[in-house]
Image (tube, rainbow, N blue to C red):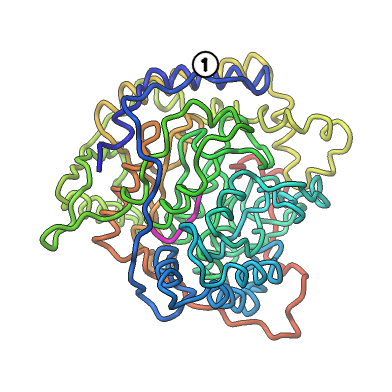
Amino acid sequence: MSAPLDGQVDRRSFLYRASALAAATTVGSVALPSIAHAAPVPTKAPLVDVPARSVDVSELTIAEAATLIRKGRLTPEQLLEAYLDRITAYDATYQAFNLVLADEALARARALGRSRGGALHGIPLAIKDNYYTKGVTTTANSYLFADFVPPYDATAVRRLTAAGGIVVGKTQMGPLATTRATTPDGRITTVNAWTPGNPSTDPGGSSSGSATAVAARMAASSVGTQTGGSITAPSNAQNLTGLKPTMGRVSLSGIVPLSYTRDHPGPLARDAMDAAIMLSSMAGEDPADPRTQGLPPVPDLVSAATPVVRSGRTRARWRTRIGVIPGFTSGTSETAVARKAALDVLAGIEGLSVVDVTMPEEWDLLTNAAFNNVRLPERSEPFLPMLRSDLRGFGVSVTGWLQGALLGANEYLIGQRAKLLLLQRVLDDLFEQCDVVVQTSPTPFDALGLPELALPIGFSSAGVPIGTILGGKPFGEDRLLAVAAAYQAETDWHHRRPADPVAPAAAARTTTVPDRGRILAHEVPDLMQ
């Protein structure tokens, strides 16, 4: 396989494009400068044969299930029914779905039959409820969109179904993609699949239902959106591999907006290979979204996510320096111990080196909450007419939206300039020391539009997953996947599945939301993604 794409992209042109993207927020959709890159990149991902590790089809990865379907040993209908059975038995506890499309999904599964198709042929998927789905209510879990029925699919949904995916349902999310999943008035809904009896354990937000649906084996994979950690946080919280791609790699057309310069659609999956299959299906240029245009072609992500094993030893696909930020393994907490162990595994893989890095100048200042809050006017602007007419439509998240509407123009401009300065220093200083960097937070890579991959690295003594985040250079998804695949070839955290909850009695299965506590309006600003 050729060199990773991040080594072929001109970092100056990415910085220039980020500057133009920030300016585009004031003038609307405009053509953005193209990203300069060294050479053509292959775009067709191969189909892979992966043997099944379990006889329970609900535990299969996408790659395992797709292999069985291609070989005629499993039908899409059989696979879907296994997931629907689990939804019927357990979702009253998990509260992962807003809406289950059982009849529509079964009709599509039967139509697909045993025929051959794309990489997702016959694979049941859960879709976050801010993605448009044609003819199906898309609420963004809010009062504002409670009755909204889109006339078309989001581009990402259309591409997933074109690859053979089956939409099994729409997932619970934070109201308007803000906090962990609650009702619009703040009552907690979705629980973490690993501790379903303890609603205080955070399932991660705002793509809570998307994560729980996959972790609880009610869908093979799912999609989320990330503006401030909403793919990486629920993935880390629930033992999944989540991939937030570079800004523009996946179209945002047909997704309820939160921030023009920070929204990123991406997959939540069981391992690196599944994340690669999902992103390969979702990614690409879209005439309806100028952020997707002028980018390098999508590389062969599936091959990048295929572990390289020679003479029984795992090797890195590409030589990669993994940067360790100051304080990453400090202390004796279970998280610190898991991080140390993960770095030891990575350092033991031929071709990977673990190096300490220093942070760019004024890092703490440029990444603090005040500068991060420049995202707030971008999320308020599309909703100004609604903010002026009836604040009740925003439910529990209203305070955060008002903050955005009230932030001064001078603060917004200073914040945008600070963000570009930070991006320049990350590209020129941090990534001169390493190729991939481990992170304790999705900040500031969300704001900078850089790719991130979340992966599991252990469990606490209470049985709660521990994860970490890898950050990459512009369009470095292939390298991130390669590092994750090598790590997962040496560990088994990603193979572990949570125990099933005690199914509630049939008479107790109602649409009433269980009393799991609530988030109050004054708490939302500190929790917003």
- Secondary structure beneath dot 1 equals helix
From what the image shows, is residue 406 above or below residue 479? Answer: above
Q: Position of residue 411 (x, y in %)?
A: 62, 18
Q: Residue at 31% of width from left, 48% of height from top?
A: 304
- Return the residue at label 1: 417
Asked whether residue 202 appears in the rendered view, the answer is no
Residue placed furthest toward the front: 115
Q: Nearer the viewer, residue 49 or 131?
A: 49
Task: Give the amino acid type for the residue marked by disc 1 in the picture.
Answer: Arg
Q: Residue at 55% of width from left, 63% of height from top?
A: 212
Q: Position of residue 443 (x, y in %)?
A: 47, 36
Q: Residue at 65% of width from left, 37% of height from top?
A: 258
Q: Residue at 43% of width from left, 78% of height from top?
A: 73
From what the image shows, is residue 393 above or below residue 35? Answer: below
Q: Nearer the viewer, residue 315 or 347?
A: 315
In which quarter of the view is residue 370 placed? top right
The segment highlighted magenta reads 267-272
Q: Position of residue 21 (x, y in %)?
A: 56, 22
Q: Is residue 268 magenta?
A: yes
Q: Nearer the viewer, residue 420 or 33?
A: 33
Q: Position of residue 9 (x, y in %)?
A: 35, 26
In which quarter of the view is residue 286 placed? top right
Q: Is residue 397 magenta?
A: no
Asked whether residue 167 appears in the rendered view, the answer is yes
Left-right relation of 30 to 363: right
The N terminus sits in image quarter: top left
